[in-house]
Image (cartoon, helix red, strand yellow):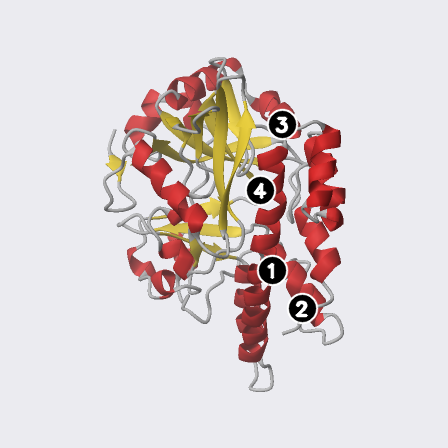
Amino acid sequence: MKTEQINDLKFDPKELFNQLMNLMDLEDRPFFFEDTKINEEYSYRVFCYNIPGYMQYQLPFARETRGSMFLIKNDTKEFVSLVVLPMPKFFTYGEQPETEKLDLSKVKRFTLKIDGSLVSSYIDFNGDLAFKTKRSPSQDSFNELIESVLYPELKEELKELTKTHTVDCELTSPTNRVILEYKDTNLSVLKVRSRETGLFEEIHSEEFKNKYPHIAKIIVEELDIGLLEGLSKKNNNIDCKGIEGGVVEMPDGTLAKIKTRYYLTQNRFANLQDFKKRNRLMVEACIEETFDELRTLFFYRKRSENYNAEGIVADMDSIEKQVRELYNPLYSKIMDFYNENKELSLEEYTEKAKEEKMHEYMSLLIPLHKGLKVNIKAFFLKKYGNKIRA
């Protein structure tokens, strides 16, 4: 099967691991990793991001922090193997230097952007097919939904392919709603990427579909390229009902998101220009990573000279800078303390937190020690949500 290259860097899984670890030294901690213990000898290490700036995404391999997962040794923290290699981070059409000048007349493919949750396949330590989210090796609620649609032949094909590749899928269901409503549970294949070469398989080819006929049935739908006619940097969303949008793929492998006006107007932060609530809503929008969509929406709404889209976006830029400078260090401070002290008894752990003057974070640190999920974003909003001003 033919493959397509997304960058010119020679791929080496161990080098990828080392480069991702180098990103952990950046001053404002925009990137991070989380370890999940498997047994006494091994753990999974997942790399992810908080709120990096665009230029930070230009650092070597920085875009591979979208959930890349490795097997490491517990004692030395050394690389053992690459377990999951999802598609890298990509941007909205017209919003960043690399996407604002794309020639859409040369688009190779235009596929549906599904409004669900990204999950990536891997073979777990027991040799079974498993799926991870962006940040976690497993999520029980997702696992149950996925199992409900994996009939034997499909599961067998996915397992065989996952031995050498990562299969990125979008999970949608009535109970997993983001903005759009889905009446049935479905798993849709978005990308298939080799963990040996870093290359993507041509999943839309007849050769792939013949080899994996059951996977072929759930490959993401292709959209009519004609929908892209007339789009430009300032008019960069499509007029189409009922969908979130699409993803354009250029001949060189560049990807870009294009949202629909229909979807953007449903965004819960769509009325961000409300003066009384604007600052608070902008902080929430930033921490929930919806700024790309909102920037697009505001320029679409600019129908007269009196609508100050540029001013709104300038305020968003100001908020984003402040949030990044506060949230990334806060997240690192909490998670660093937890990771460095999680093996202590609860009493020792609590005492050390007091010694290091971490009192205000106890509502997060104690649940973390107990193995519970915590919402650091909600804590941040409570602490800073009404203090940050554009």
Q: Report the number of discs.
A: 4
Judging by the rendered image, the residue that carries numbered circle 4 is: 336
| Residue designated by label 3 | 343
Badges 3 and 1: C-beta atoms under 8 Å apart?
Answer: no
Circle 4 or circle 1, nearest the eye: 4
Of the residues tagged 2 and 3, which is closer to the observer? 3
Q: Amino acid at mark 4?
A: Asp
The disc, 4 or 3, on the residue closer to the chain's N-terminal end is 4
Instruction: Work out whether 29 lies above or below 14.
Output: below
Q: Nearer the viewer, mark 4 or mark 2?
A: 4
Which is more N-terminal, label 1 or label 3? 1
Identify the residue under disc 2: 388
**Label located before the other in sequence (4 or 2):** 4
Labelled disc at residue 326: 1
Q: Is residue 262 visible?
A: no
Mark 4 to mark 2: distance in Å?
25 Å
